[in-house]
Amino acid sequence: MRPALIVIEAGKLNPFSQKLASGGRDPIPVASAGQEGRTLRTNDVARIQFIGDMTTLRRAFVAASIVWAALLPLAPFAASQPAPAPFWYGLALVVYGAGSFICHQLPARSFHSWSAQWPVCARCTGIYLGAAMAAVVATVRLKPDTTHETVRLKPDTTYVRRMSTRRARGLLVAAALPTAVTLIYEWTTGNTPSNAIRALAGAPLGAAVALIVIEALRIQTAGRR
């Protein structure tokens, strides 16, 4: 009996011939070099876009923290300007309006400058000033060193120091203790601490929140490099 011949046309195997040539096993699809290149390029573009988004978000958070802290003492100056002052009145309207959504704005619990009340209370002022200072410190600390060029032959994420959830919670609790002490003192004695004390007590809380947010965004960026 003559052995059966399999005719291969145009260099292509039909599914039956592919299975027969592989010893009865299903053929394993192999991507071409062009397809692999396109896949790698697509992944690289997605990674670069993600890193850019996280970097932009971190910079926006830092800028917003600094700008908002700067507007707090500027708003009473704007509100105290004599008429007509459309620019200053518009600025004051926006800042005081935003402050009304996040603070009770009680006059007795707020700082005053130029015979005008600040947009938020003293405790909120301390929180936002603390966040702004922490944002500046974190930005300076995370600024890349351009004096040396680091070349990595393969991805390595071991250098990324991650802030654990437990550590972040501990930092947040410790930073909130001064504010908690002032609240407990006020509720138990009926005496209200001075605005300066309430602002100083709120500063660590704002700084801790800002550091945690910036650290989380930094880890997301570093983990995709």
Image: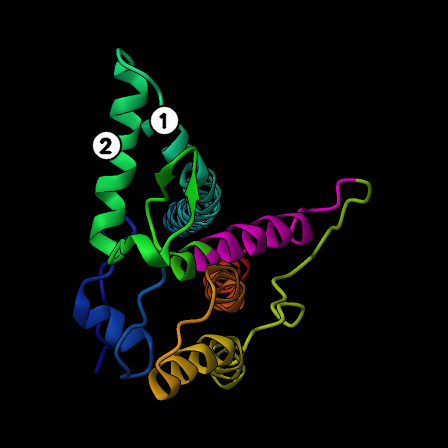
Q: Tell me the crowding category of disc 1: few under 14, some 14 to 19, or many 20 or more residues within 10 angstroms, Cα based.
A: many
State the residue lying farthest toward the right.
147
Tell me if residue 140 is in the magenta stretch: yes
x and y, in percent, of residue 16 in the image: 17, 72
Q: Which of these two is toward me, 121 or 130?
A: 121
How far, Cα to Cα, is label 1 from label 2?
Answer: 9 Å
Q: Looking at the figure, which quarter contains the N terminus?
A: bottom left
Local secondary structure at mark 1: helix
Residue at 25% of width from left, 15% of height from top? 86
**Image quadrant assignment for residue 19:** bottom left
Kindly report the secondary structure that dominates the magenta region of the rendered protein. Answer: helix
Q: Which residue is mark 1?
A: 78
**Magenta stretch bounds:** 126-146
Q: Tell me the crowding category of disc 2: few under 14, some 14 to 19, or many 20 or more residues within 10 angstroms, Cα based.
A: some
x and y, in percent, of residue 104 in the image: 24, 58
Residue at 35% of width from left, 81% of height from top? 190
Q: Which of these two is toward me, 139 or 201?
A: 201
Q: Earlier in the sequence, mark 1 or mark 2?
A: 1
- Answer with left or right where residue 139 lies relative to residue 3: right
Local secondary structure at mark 2: helix
Per the rendering, the mark at residue 93 is 2
Residue at 70% of width from left, 56% of height from top? 152
Residue kind at label 2, given as amino acid type: Leu
Residue kind at label 1, given as amino acid type: Ala
